[in-house]
Structure formats: structure tokens, C-alpha cells
Amino acid sequence: MFANRQGARQTKDNISRRLKTAIKRANPKLANAGIEPLSLEKVTPYSFRRTYASLRAALRDDPVYAAEQMGHTDPAFTFRTYAKAVRRRGRLSGAHLEAFDRALEWARIGPAESAEIGRNADLGAEEVSNPASESQERH
């Protein structure tokens, strides 16, 4: 859930607009660093949810905990849906494999410790919570 200044939940359109603004600002910096720019069409708020769940599955977190974090009532559903990331890692190589492993390490130690350990890696992230009222079938 992303809160506005008054603490209320932001609309999907507002979140999408803010995300696109952030991507537009980040892309020149990514290009200067030799990193492929982010797609305005492919990166969505849902991408963060999918990434979170995939990292939890790849780290083999407790299925019940991960399902609760996602708002699912069935842990098997959560891991069946997001365990694809574990299989996908086996097909990666080079820079993509390194990036995947850095993401796993970041997820393992958490954003606060990651920022402390290696600020130059730019792996820190804001904590985002997900309302438990989301549909079980949403993934």
C-alpha cells in the first residue's frame, strides 16, 4: 500500500503516474552507468508485487509467511505461482545471473542492512506493505 500525505491509500492511476515519473528520471542515470533503461510499459506497480513474491520463493521462505504477506490464504497457490523465479535462475548467465543473485542477497538481509553494507550498489528500497484485503487469486 502506498499512502498519500494524509495517510490514505493512493489510487492505482496515481501510483502508476509516480512510477513512470521515477522511471523517466532514472533512465538517464542508468544509461550513464551502462545499464539498460527501464521500460515505461513493462514496469508496473504489479511488477513490485511479482518481484517480492518471486524473491521470497527463490529464498525458500516459509510458505505460510510468504502467503500471508501477499494476502493469499493458500500457501501452495503462492509458491506454485511464484516459484518460476527459482527455475528461471538456472537459465541466467553473466550480468543477469549476477543481478539476480544481488537481488536475492538484498532480499535475504533486508533493505536497511543492504544500504549500510554497500551504498554504492544502490540496492536499498522503501518498505512497502500490502493490504490483506487483496484477492487470493491476485498474483
Image: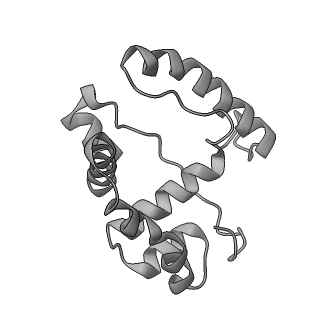
Left or right of 19, for residue 91: left
Q: Is residue 133 visible?
A: yes
Quarter occupied by the C terminus: bottom right
Left or right of 118, for residue 106: right
Of residues 84 and 21, the one nearer the viewer is 84
Q: Quadrant of residue 83?
A: bottom left
Q: Residue at x 38, y 69 (%)?
A: 87
Q: Is residue 129 visible?
A: no
Of residues 139 and 2, the one nearer the viewer is 139
Q: Position of residue 49 (x, y in %)?
A: 57, 56
Image colouring:
one colour
Q: Residue at x 37, y 67 (%)?
A: 86
Left or right of 8, for residue 31: left
Of residues 80 and 3, the one nearer the viewer is 80
Q: Residue at x 32, y 43 (%)?
A: 99
Q: Position of residue 103 (x, y in %)?
A: 34, 48
Instruction: Tally the marks.
Output: 0
Q: Quadrant of residue 20?
A: top right
Q: Residue most toward the left?
A: 117
Q: Position of residue 80 (x, y in %)?
A: 51, 80
Relative to 57, residue 119 above or below: above
Left or right of 43, for residue 86: left
Q: Position of residue 51 (x, y in %)?
A: 49, 55
Of residues 89 and 124, the one nearer the viewer is 89
Relative to 126, residue 38 above or below: above
Q: Residue at x 51, y 86 (%)?
A: 76
